[in-house]
Image (cartoon, rainbow, N blue to C red):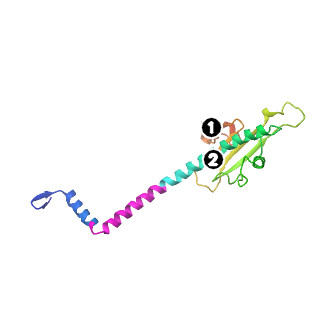
Amino acid sequence: MATQKGKTASPEDIMSDKFNKFLADGSGQVIVLALVVIAIFQSAATILPDYSIRNSEGRAKWVLREMGSSQLAYQGTNNPKKYGSFRALQQDQYIGAQYTTANIISGYALDWTVNNPSSGRGCLCSGIGNNTFTIVARPYLHRPKGLSTFAITDDQVLRKFVPANGNLDYSVKSWDPII
């Protein structure tokens, strides 16, 4: 142990004193500031990709819910009471003209399927109860890993594709519902 004016000083006191002198001359402040900035950037680099994925997925779910509501509104306002294609909803101004199925959700493309089985011949298969739609938001292949696939159907249930849970890609109604 070192002594200082008749007192015994601990190693921590000596280091603290040296550190304070190091900071006092200015060069230490620059190094400490640089280390703090590096730590902040390192934290941001680990947090931002996760935030970006959650933000993209949140937008995908929100847009799909809006598209489901738009389908119901479109069906309620047209005479044959059928669901509409993406283009039909744009023409009736349920979807902005600037959007396409490839740009309405960043990082995703929409698969849009409408099934209107009415043949106009009065068969049992025709009618409002047999109209269906499926809208699937699939991540672009070049996007970072981690984005999930979501879908909404005529039953207005938002679903997430989770293959580990036995979901079948071709059977959207087998996907996990999001509550």
Which is more toward the observer, 168 or 108?
A: 108
- On the image, the x and y values in percent for residue 91 come to 78, 49
Residue displayed at 61% across by 48% down:
59
User: Residue under circle 2?
Assistant: 60
The amino acid type found where label 1 is placed reads Asp
Secondary element at tag 2:
helix
Q: Main secondary structure of the magenta part?
A: helix
- Residue reaching furthest right? 121
- On the image, the x and y values in percent for residue 96 come to 71, 51
Question: Quarter-wise, where is residue 177 in the image?
Answer: top right
User: Residue under circle 1?
Assistant: 176
The quadrant the N terminus occupies is bottom left
Question: Quarter-wise, where is residue 167 in the image?
Answer: top right
The amino acid type found where label 2 is placed reads Ala
Asked if residue 28 is positioned above or below residue 178 in the image, the reply reads: below
Asked if residue 88 is positioned above or below residue 36 in the image, the reply reads: above
Residue range of the region highlighted in magenta in the rendering = 24-45
For marks 1 and 2 on the same chain, the one whose residue lies earlier in the sequence: 2
- The crowd level at tag 1 (other Cα within 10 Å; few <14, some 14-19, many 20+) is some
The quadrant the C terminus occupies is top right
**Is there any visible trace of residue 149 in the rendered image?**
no
Asked if residue 176 is positioned above or below residue 33 in the image, the reply reads: above
Question: Quarter-wise, where is residue 131 in the image?
Answer: top right
Which is more toward the observer, 140 or 178?
A: 178
